[in-house]
Amino acid sequence: MQFRPTFHGAIIALSTGLLLTACASDTATSRAHLLKSESAPLSVVYQTKELQDAADKAKSLDKDSTLVVFDIDDTLLTATEFFGSDKWYDWQRGRALNQAGDLVNIATSDKVNCLFDVLGMVFEIAVNRPTQPNMADIVAGVNNDVVILTARSGAYRAATMRELARNQLNFADNSLAPTDMGYHYDYTLGGRTAQVSYVNGVFMVQGLNKGVLLLDLLKRSGKQYKSVVFVDDKKHNIDNMANALKSANINYYGFHYTRISKAVSEHEVAQAKAANIGLNALLDAHFVDRSTHLSQRQCDY
């Protein structure tokens, strides 16, 4: 696999203090790693379609001082249907792109009421599949401490843990806290307060900055690492993690995972419209009170 690294910070030579410009090659990365000082942690990002690349990087580093962090949606698992998927969420928020890279407009009438309530229903109903056939084997082969770091809300924990287990993923033994124990707390960032939770290795941060929240988790758990390997399908998460770890003087190896297409097609939009009509019909016929709440935008999530 040919990587395409980009550096977020400079590497300072211990002996001369000379500022080095890093080359976009694994050879240059290795040389820079040897020359880095405590005041300038290594920060490099790769784009990849193979989870094994991140696992191999972790294997090349010291096991006890390296933390491996995986996202869930479109990184370890992906939806089997467009409705309720990660890119459906982007479409609902008006930021989805088509195959040509153009913005896919969404009509007001196509936006669901109480987006996060609907998303919760879909998580309960739907199943996920691995992003690649050997996903579970690759993850099981990682011997480092592991954190699963997802933007999902803790309100979706039961459905999330069900699908992780169904896809042969269990992180309780790798947890930074005792099994079935963890952290549930409110965190305020950028004027927004969210309920976040960390239990059995899965950290659910409700859309907050993943880099900032990972550092908070490490502080709460009393864990310290020299390096972090992070895999995520969203570039802004990769960048946020880079900025946070740089401030904490932690070496960073980010893997922007692009195996799952983010392009939204007209067929998928049509499928989502039909699915929403079907869901509303079900609620209208059998769950009248909840249907009324949603139609009146009385959101519970």
Image: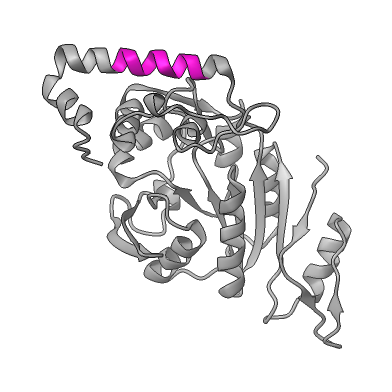
Is residue 68 found inside the magenta-colored segment of the image?
Answer: no
The region drawn magenta spans: 269-279
In the image, residue 223 lies at what x, y percent?
Answer: 46, 68
The residue under the point 58% across, 45% down is: 234
Near-viewer residue (187 or 70): 187
Classify 95 as above or below 23: above
Is residue 277 found inside the magenta-colored segment of the image?
Answer: yes
In the image, residue 207 lies at what x, y percent?
Answer: 42, 50
The residue under the point 32% across, 12% down is: 278
Question: Relative to 175, is 257 on the left or the right?
Answer: right
The residue under the point 13% across, 19% down is: 288
Question: Relative to 126, is 285 on the left or the right?
Answer: left
In the image, residue 222 lies at what x, y percent?
Answer: 41, 71
Tell me, yes or no, if residue 113 can be seen here. yes
Near-viewer residue (20 or 273): 273
Classify 194 as above or below 260: below
Near-viewer residue (202 or 10): 10
Tell me, yes or no, if residue 55 can be seen here. no
